[in-house]
Image (cartoon, rainbow, N blue to C red):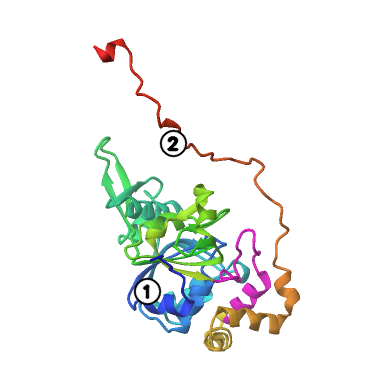
Amino acid sequence: MSVDKRMTLKEAVSKFILEGDTLYYGGFQIMVPMALTYEIIRQRKKHLNILSTSTDAGGLDLLVAAGCIDEMHLAWAMNWCARAPHAIQRAFQDGELKRHDISNFGATGALMAGYLGVPFFPVRGNIGTDVVKYNSADVRIIDDPFTGKPITVVRAWRADVALIHAQRADHLGNVVAWGTHGNGDQHGAMGSKRGVIVTAEEIVDPEMVRSDPDRTLIPYYKTLAVVPCPWGAHPSACRGFYGLDVRFAQYQGKYMKKKEIVPHFLNEWIYGVKDHKAYIQKYVNTFGQEALERLKPILGFKPQMEVDYGYHDPNIWEGVPPYTDMHIRG
């Protein structure tokens, strides 16, 4: 029986994300899992904890605005187009959100420790900063057992479930990504306890994935669900498919700026549409097909160096006698 992990956004979020879960939230300025973000809000998931290196396009800001997140551990979260993550700022200042800040490499090191299965990871650069003072949940100082000098370590991060967006996946769950596919997506996903939910621009044949193994970010056995989802990172970018939607990120950010108008955005763009396909259709109906076309990149920016992995047929050894010489025979 062939394994097929394809399912809808609704099915994937409903089946694999439980209230109170700790989630790895992928992306790094681009490739943010926005369609998954909208569906989590649409299903009104609560009391989630977030692990992330850094993310943009306001995805985490939306989750906080919708009341889905209790606690986040990360280097930074932003909506550069709106100049600030307004909902996160507001929730933190009002005591509604616990935030544990860590350095960029500290976050990466924490995910690497989770991936490697070790309890912590040494990170230079935090000694003398307030990171150690205010985030003892993630960062401690110990004596280096080899030199005796103090060094900061970060605890291993292991999420229950990882959320990522990629260019391609096959129905088995092999995930293919290229370009900037997240500062910690591979480690965050591979270190997750239950597995990964991936939204993908395209579903391709497994043979195509096997033909280019170096671009396989996540192997099938780690994947819980594959969601076919064109424009699944919108309004963030997806390398080779579309660029950052600056105007929509600004539009969304203006709603996040004032608490009293946040519900209007949530009702119109998330609760009021049944799925991501309907969200994109609403975008076209509101801003025009030309707005979507404007996001498509100029293609042809390909690697200059072609590679050929080759194939060595093991049958060439049939009938060939074992190599030997007089010393071995003796």
> Which stretch appears magenta?
229-255
Residue that mark 1 sits on = 16
- Residue 16 percent coordinates (x, y): 37, 74
SS at badge 2: helix
Residue 152 drawn above or below residue 317? below
- Residue 85 percent coordinates (x, y): 53, 72
The numbered dot on residue 143 is: none
Residue 124 drawn above or below residue 25? above
Marks 2,1: beta carbons within 8 A = no
Of pointers 2 and 1, the one earlier in the residue sequence: 1
- Residue 28 percent coordinates (x, y): 53, 60
Type of residue at label 2?
A: Asn
Residue 7 drawn above or below residue 298? below
Q: Is residue 48 inside the magenta stretch? A: no
- Residue 42 percent coordinates (x, y): 47, 83
Residue found at x 59% / y 83% = 278
